[in-house]
Amino acid sequence: MTYTEASAIPRDASTRARLTQRLHRFVTYLLLIGTSICFLIPFAWLVISSLKPNDQIFVFPPTWWPKPVEWSNYIQALTSQPFGRYALNSLLIALVNVIGNLVSNSFVAYGFARFRFPGRRLLFMLLLATMMVPSQVLLVPQFILFHDLGWIDTFLPLTVPSFFGSAFYVFLLRQFFMTIPIELEEAARIDGAGPLRIFFSVVLPLIRPALTAVAIFSFQGAWNDFLTPLIYLSDPSKFTLQLGLAQFQGSFHTDWNLIMAASVVVMLPMAIIFFVAQKYFVQGITMTGTKG
Amino acid sequence: MKRSVKIASAIAGAAVLVALGIAIPTALNRPGAFASSKNTGSASTAAPVTITLGTWGGAQENQQLMQIIDKINQKYKGKFVIEDYNVPGGNYDQKLNTEFAAGTAPDIFYVDDSLAQTYASEGVLLDLTQYINEFKSKALVANPANYYPNTLVDVRYSGHYYALPWIAQPVVMYYNPKLFQQAHLPIPSPNWTWQDFMRDAKKLTNPSKGIYGYLQSNGWPPVEMYIWSYGGDIYNASKTKALLNTPADIKGLTLMADMVKEGVVPPLAKLANVDIEDLFRQGRVAMFAGGAADGNYDTNGFTAKIQQMPMGTTHATDLYIADLAINAHSKVPKEDLYLAYTALLDGIDHWKIVPPVKQYAANLQDIVVPGAPGNHTPSDRIQPILESLKYAKVIPVVKNMANYWNIMSNDIYQPLLLGQMTPQQAAQKAEQDLNANLK
Amino acid sequence: MKHSSLAVREWLTGYLFISPWLIGFIVFTLGPLAASLYLSFTNYNLLQSPQFIGAQNYVQMVHDPNFWQALSVTFYYAIFAIPLDLAVALALAILLNQRVRYMPLFRTIFYLPAILPPVATSVLWNWILNPDYGILNAFLHALGLPQPQWLVTPQWTVPAYIVMSVWGVGTWMVIFLAGLQDVPQSLYEAAAIDGASIWGSFWNITLPMISPVLLFNLVQGVIGTFSYFTQAYIMGNGVGGSNAGVDNAGLFYALYLYIQGFAELHMGYASALAWVLFFIVLILTLLIFKGSALWVYYGGERD
């Protein structure tokens, strides 16, 4: 009798819990799918436009289905310019940026997060302040600087600065470093580990999601950058993908269908990288249970 | 010590990457990514000099230009090599200005006509007097006397030439003969007036079918044309005063306002983000004022024809000019620069419609036009184009052109096309703002 | 003043860690920053050397109606875009943090808008926001709501950009998502056992735990909205029509700055505009940091 009585109560509670869970899951899926549709409609339009002949893109009222379906847009877009070379250039710049940013910014951010040194507050404010001056007025002085260094028409202005930290990523990583309980590092110090050891073995692994974010943003920033390559690169063999896309804009006539097709292709690597990077976006293992 | 080893290895890693950045491209047999490929141009007579050329234009256009450049490079092999540095997208001026600031502008470059005066006055363009004296007897393009005078208004400064135009495109009226026929209207004649135009436009407009007689958007066609066709002008001769609030100018503004009043143009809101010339090609707009080189050969169910713009009290139309100039601080020997400059102008004049040189314009039918029937401009278009070129005018250039367009948009186009102001009111406000902009 | 060797060692290690930035700052940033500050006191048209004119640019600014217009447009945008975008980004991040199948796919879809090439976005948005045929108005029509004349009227220009900004929350969303990873699930479970509501656990667990990241997004939001440029520049490139929208309703500060510097070749004035903006943003940021002590919780507090 106690057997059935006792088990009757937990069964009700667990059923209730399971129902709420199911409801919760249903609502979540609903929201996810609903929002996804919202976000995907414009992309559907992009892809559809990429399959239209140029004169059908700006019709009013707008049509949804291309007739005829111009798969040739993709072929024409990708062969009318050396997109293979552009892709290699973009890839090189992006990868170097990712490495440079990951390495330099984590060092600098940790320095600001954990160490007390004179002028720390001031220097951090200075760091933030560098983000507050609109880049348009720094363009010319920077160009002159790089010209004096002899770096014009090379990839150097587009890659080297990433090895010296960037205010955005430093600030971001600093915030994450500061959420790590100090006890972890103190414990490691008591065990005799030096700051570099603590940095690499204890602290960095804990902010893996943030580092992944930095890597993604860094890649994307370089991949989608239009203005800096435009200003610093002159030799067409060094052009990046974004410059290639812009070359579909002629003086009197723009091949929007080709821009659309090329854009879809240019976007794909970023989307794939982001998708693949998701597995690094997992909760840090040692975080649970440390702060009660 | 462990710490320094770690730091050293991090630095070494970065250095390896940089080295790879140099090695891989070199191995792939392209100019090294980390080494500049720009030759500063040696003055030695042995090796061929590199001449850098700054251009704008999309990929297709640029390929055509490359063919011209290749021919020039062949002809002058061993003497000089022209390298084309095309600027993608619409940011040519920004890049050129930045390069001026650093002193790295190309040796020869395209110049936006509205900036020619500014560049000339600030000393970044080479004074072409010596060039003209040397070459005017050797090449048609080197003698200003061979050019249509209206194409040279912006390339002269203090009595000297600082650039020469390579294209002079007048605006002409494209029309749809099929729609004219269906409305039992005679096709436009060379000296047709705005009254003829209005009469035609009203008959051609059929809102139920979504067909309009004409098209006027915020900025296109330029209202300046209408003003000029009534004998009006934007400024006085010395460009010290705006003349918008004068009877002739107001007539031009009224013309545009009447287009809206009579309903012969699509409502402005319907034109947001639409390719307006495409509306003509689709047969939704019967008449469209477009550049002579626009072509419109790929129309839907009819063959587009052109005529000169209608007259008010006189013939008038807009003119688009682009110039070629030499960098005043170029280190390339003048002799090579002059030869390259001449060759480029000559080559482009045989490519673009319409060449600003009278002798070349007279041979308009010989210029290859990919996409046109028979790859050449149809013979019935030659006459209207050449006639238009004789009286076409460039919109007057003042120091603050960006603000000029702003004023026109906010004070003229928007209020008149939306019926918010009378032409007189708009003229008054615009004249005030234009005068303020002249300071 | 004697410092312990331990403290000195900490100083040195600290400097060592931030040395990449320090070096980079001195080599790449300090020069151009100082140059642009100097340029703000000059007349500079890029073609000739700058000419010193003292504080004239700053005086001219006060009397420049476009300056005030640009400030008001930018403030208008910032006041609405920042809270809206933060809220949406956080909501989406929480949504994306659920344990649901195919989550990587959903996350990628939500992030897609942020990776669209800039060239294509103007066409896309002009289509979405078209007053007559755009899907936004079609959607509003379906809901029986009024359909504003986006972008073609002054009053609906900045709102159009605010709508566009929601689209671009991908970056903030990812950062919030990264921050949410650090919130231990055990906290939520404990709270659920104690009978906390969804809102309660959000307010008392989620927000405090992600407050460092929230601070980051807030400060970046301020800096970003005040220097908002790319979208405004791309959208406005039309024949005759100005970048700045009808009646300058879309004259964002950075856009005005760009026009002054590169289109009208008043680079000195543009530099002055830039440094005025700098001060405004600096003051706002300092205020935010000062106030942050009240609501930001660093798990590894060591300040």
Image (spheres, coloured by chain):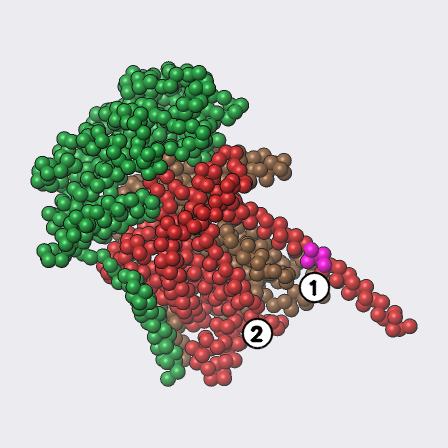
Residue C234 image point, x, y percent: 41, 44
Asked which secondary structure carries label 2, the reply is helix
Residue A244, horizontal then vertical, whole percent: 37, 51
Q: Nearer the viewer, residue B244 or A258?
A: A258
Q: Quadrant of the C terminus of chain A?
A: bottom right
User: Magenta stretch: residue C57 in it?
Assistant: no
Residue B124 seen anywhere in this rendered image of the structure: no
Q: Colour of chain B?
A: green
Q: Main secondary structure of the magenta part?
A: helix
Give the residues in magenta.
A22-26
Q: Which residue type carries mark 1?
A: Ala
**Residue sitting at 58 percent across and 57 percent down?**
C106
Quadrant that contains the N terminus of chain A: bottom right
Report the front residue among B118 and B29. B29
Q: CA distance from mark 2 to mark 1?
A: 22 Å
Q: Residue C182 in the image: x percent, y percent?
A: 56, 66
- Circle 2 is placed at which residue position? A286
Note whether C129 is above or below A91 in the view shown.
above
Left or right: C198 in relation to A60: right
Residue B304, visible in the rendered structure: yes
- The chain displayed red equals A
Q: Position of residue B62 (x, y in %)?
A: 30, 46
Chain in brown, by letter, is: C
For residue B202, side relative to residue C190 (left or right): left
